[in-house]
């Protein structure tokens, strides 16, 4: 991906930049100015979140004497309160476990399904693929009420295990489609060679197809992790006790108390809850972009 | 194919165990490979979907099995001003937010399609609103919309002196509705922009060169090359966006919980309020089911968008 960008930059320098209408000033007004506004607006809530979490309460509630865009005396009080006076570490831990569990489960299920659909090619395999794609279009908002009764029937109500089992409903369709795309890009001849050499289908999957599909697996994995970390409606509907809640639900239901909102603590909680995905994201940016666009293009 | 390979003398001599042979038997392997995915989806997606439709025709409450009541729930909803209100706001919310997301997102994609330094870094930063948990950024918006300490009010009143009093973002119906729509647009722009950017990059530069040689203006190049070439991907991204905006839950639940005086309820939040919080599972399910006709419409739209794209560009594996 980087290669193509570099190359197209080189191309652009050669040709269209020399056009008369593309003068520097015009470029500034038409490209950099709007881009700057977009970035400013898209990032401002995060800046505001971050700056609020380090402001002492006195500054938070007094814009007359303190410039709200800056902190005069930063404090770690909100974060300390969060880590030591609330169950926040516990919520983080639960969220992490749920995200890892559901990601693993969906990766296994969707790798096998994608392999069967794309490589074992049977009658009606394209319909199975289409069916799984359609499953992606069923939004959680119409499922959570009946799912709540199903979860109760299974005796999983108020258990993080319910979330691990339910999240694959939106992860598996996405991952399967992503992986079908990846498997498609692996030359079938490789598998034929192995087949001729007497390898079994499972050996082929493990030794040939999977190693070649590692970028796809990483994309699917980090995407699933983020989606499960961010999930809200199921976690809100299926988990009742404070200790088992995931971070997004817990902040909204446990930290928002009474009429006076503890904005410092709330924002610190949001910041800490966002950081793991943000860090994760920054490590794998290219995979994110390619899976996002790959899934759309498929 | 595998069967013939297996029966070849070379393999038989090696005597693979019956388990290995079973797993190499193609129909069995197909079933085993599909079982986990199909099983999960059947138990936790298809079954609940059917169950939800069934529940919508019963008077089930939490802790009590309901009996079949026919269309009673739906008849009740049709006379319920709150449901009509939620339908109205869901449509307004989806309409305005989708328009905003696509207008701004397309613009951002076109901007990002230019060449400038630190492009990939910028692209990475722009996706942040979409990566971060929605509820958490919604909380940040809630704080930005605070009646007393809103930073926007501070800017408008104390810095720019455009207004004399603080903006009441969430206190009355219409401002609250538009504040939520703004937050939704903010969250949706990155996804739209990055997906459309991918589409833009697949358009061959030679088309633009040819058009420029023919003397096409920038607007004409956009109108007759970019836009038609982007149509298929626009259709798909828009379908996704419409489905997930119409059924949105998190933003509204986090910022207003449907208030003030129930004016910002979407169908999903109303279903949650009646079904889970209020315990009227049957009625909640009926509200959720009433979203389905709209979603079916959007899905068909997506399907035909997809079909047309395959016909246009053939199968490419990028």
Image: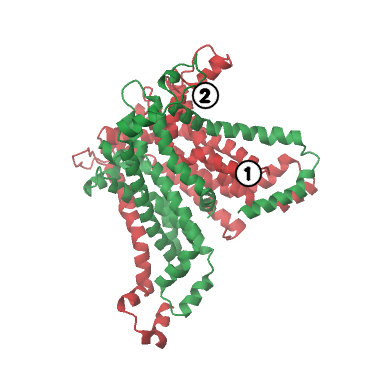
Chain colours: A green, B red
Residue B25 in picture, x, y percent from top left = 36, 75
How many numbered marks are there? 2
- Between the C-alphas of marks 2 and 1, the distance is 28 Å
Residue topped by disc 2: A70
Disc 2 with disc 1 on a shared chain: no
Query: Mark 2 against mark 1, which lies toward the viewer?
Result: 2
Work out which quarter of the rendered image holds the N terminus of chain B and state it: bottom left
Residue topped by disc 1: B119
Residue B118 in picture, x, y percent from top left = 63, 43
**Displayed quadrant of residue B13:** bottom left
| Horizontal relation, residue B207 to residue B230: left or right | right
Q: Is residue A223 visible?
A: yes
Q: Residue at x 59, y 43 (%)?
A: B121
Q: Chain of mark 1?
A: B
Residue B128 in picture, x, y percent from top left = 51, 40
Q: Residue at x 35, y 32 (%)?
A: A82
Height in image: B183 above or below B22?
Answer: above
Q: Pointer 1: residues within 10 angstroms few (<14), some, or many (20+)?
A: some
Q: Chain of mark 2?
A: A
| Horizontal relation, residue B226 to residue A228: left or right | right
Work out which quarter of the rendered image holds the C terminus of chain B and state it: bottom right
Height in image: A81 above or below B133?
Answer: above
Q: Pointer 2: residues within 10 angstroms few (<14), some, or many (20+)?
A: few
Q: Is residue B285 visible?
A: no
Does dot 2 land on a helix, a strand or a loop? loop
**Displayed quadrant of residue A121:** bottom left
């Amino acid at each position: 991906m980087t290669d193509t960008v570099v190359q197209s930059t080189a191309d652009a320098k050669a040709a269209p930049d020399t056009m008369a209408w593309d003068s520097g000033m015009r470029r500034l007004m038409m490209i950099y100015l709007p881009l700057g506004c977009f970035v400013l607006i898209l990032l401002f809530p995060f800046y505001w979140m971050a700056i609020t979490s380090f402001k002492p309460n006195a500054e938070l509630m007094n814009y007359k004497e303190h410039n709200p865009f800056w902190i005069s005396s930063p404090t770690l009080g909100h974060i300390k309160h969060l880590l030591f006076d609330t169950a926040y570490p516990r919520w983080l831990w639960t969220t992490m476990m749920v995200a890892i569990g559901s990601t693993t489960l969906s990766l296994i299920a969707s790798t096998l399904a994608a392999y069967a659909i794309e490589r074992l090619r049977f009658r009606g395999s394209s319909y199975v693929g289409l069916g799984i794609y359609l499953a992606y279009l069923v939004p959680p908002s119409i499922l959570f009420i009946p799912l709540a009764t199903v979860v109760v029937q299974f005796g999983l109500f108020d258990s993080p295990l319910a979330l691990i089992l339910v999240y694959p409903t939106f992860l598996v369709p996405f991952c399967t489609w992503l992986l079908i795309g990846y498997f498609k890009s692996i030359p079938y001849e490789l598998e034929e060679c192995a087949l001729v050499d007497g390898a079994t289908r499972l050996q082929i999957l493990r030794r040939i197809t999977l190693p070649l599909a590692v970028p796809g697996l990483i994309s699917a994995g980090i995407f699933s992790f983020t989606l499960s970390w961010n999930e809200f409606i199921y976690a809100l509907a299926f988990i009742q006790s404070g200790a088992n809640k995931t971070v997004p639900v817990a902040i909204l239901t446990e930290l928002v108390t009474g009429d006076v909102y503890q904005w410092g603590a709330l924002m610190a909680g949001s910041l800490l809850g966002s950081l793991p995905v943000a860090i994760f994201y920054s490590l794998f940016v290219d995979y994110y972009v390619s899976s996002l666009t790959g899934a759309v293009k498929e | 194919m595998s069967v013939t390979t297996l029966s070849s003398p070379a393999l038989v001599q090696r005597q693979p165990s019956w388990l290995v042979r079973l797993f190499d038997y193609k129909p069995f392997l197909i079933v085993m490979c599909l079982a986990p995915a199909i099983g999960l989806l059947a138990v936790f997606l298809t079954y609940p979907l059917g169950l939800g439709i069934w529940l919508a025709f019963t008077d089930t409450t939490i802790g009590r099995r309901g009996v079949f009541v026919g269309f009673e729930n739906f008849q009740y909803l049709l006379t319920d001003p709150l449901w009509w209100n939620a339908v109205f706001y869901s449509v307004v919310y989806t309409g305005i937010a989708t328009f905003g997301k696509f207008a701004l997102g397309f613009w951002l994609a076109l901007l990002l399609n230019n060449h400038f330094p630190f492009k990939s870094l910028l692209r990475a930063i722009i996706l942040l609103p979409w990566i971060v948990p929605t509820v958490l950024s919604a909380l940040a918006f809630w704080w930005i919309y605070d009646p007393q300490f809103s930073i926007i009010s501070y800017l408008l009143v104390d810095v720019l002196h455009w207004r004399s009093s603080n903006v009441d973002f969430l206190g009355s119906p219409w401002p609250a509705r538009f504040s939520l729509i703004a937050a939704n647009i903010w969250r949706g722009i990155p996804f739209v922009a990055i997906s459309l950017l991918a589409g833009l990059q697949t358009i061959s530069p030679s088309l633009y060169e040819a058009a420029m040689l023919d003397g096409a203006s920038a607007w004409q190049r956009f109108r007759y090359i970019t836009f038609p070439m982007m149509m298929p991907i626009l259709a798909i991204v828009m379908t996704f966006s419409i489905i997930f905006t119409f059924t949105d839950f998190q933003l509204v639940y986090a910022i207003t919980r449907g208030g003030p005086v129930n004016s910002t309820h979407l169908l999903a939040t109303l279903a949650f309020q009646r079904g889970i919080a209020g315990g009227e599972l049957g009625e909640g399910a009926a509200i959720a089911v009433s979203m389905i006709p709209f979603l079916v419409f959007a899905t068909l739209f997506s399907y035909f968008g997809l079909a047309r794209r395959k016909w246009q560009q053939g199968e490419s594996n990028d």
